[in-house]
Image (cartoon, rainbow, N blue to C red):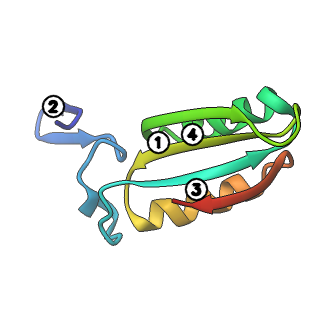
Amino acid sequence: MTATTQHASTRYEHPHEAGPERDGGTVAESFGHTVTVADGFDGVNRIMGKLRSHRYRVTDFHAYPVSEPSTWAAEYTVAGTTDDARLLRGKLERIPSVIEVHSR
């Protein structure tokens, strides 16, 4: 189902609500990353903030502490194209608290 607004003869589809063919990217029903972050739960919140600020369609999200109390992992699945996956990975790698990003 897509979000649309009708205005006279103009039709608007939000880019993340439109079909995967919207930007010519290679279709991937969904993609995911496992992101290891420093700064504990604050680092996890930065990951969630990045996902929300770019309006990704998150279908699954889990966060849990790993080896040290201040090191956490966030795993998520997002609906989108392979181009979306590559762009998001680049954005995540620029967050200072991110230690590493693995594709799932």
Give the x, y percent position of residue 79: 37, 48
- When the figure is inspected, residue 41 is found, relative to residue 99, above or below; the finding is above
- When the figure is inspected, residue 63 is found, relative to residue 83, above or below; the finding is above
- What's the residue type where badge 3 is placed? Leu
Residue 87 placement, left or right of 22: right
The residue shown at (11%, 40%) is 9
Nearer to us: label 3 or label 2 = 3
Instruction: Write down the residue under mark 2.
Output: 6
Marks 4 and 2 sit apart, C-alpha to C-alpha, by: 28 Å
Of the image marks 1 and 3, the number of the one nearer the N terminus:
1
Of the image marks 2 and 1, the number of the one nearer the N terminus:
2
Instruction: Write down the residue under mark 1.
Output: 56
Instruction: Write down the residue under mark 4.
Output: 51
Residue 59 placement, left or right of 75: left
In the picture, the quarter occupied by the N terminus is: top left
The residue shown at (46%, 42%) is 56
Contact (Cβ within 8 Å) of mark 4 with mark 3: yes
The residue shown at (68%, 58%) is 101
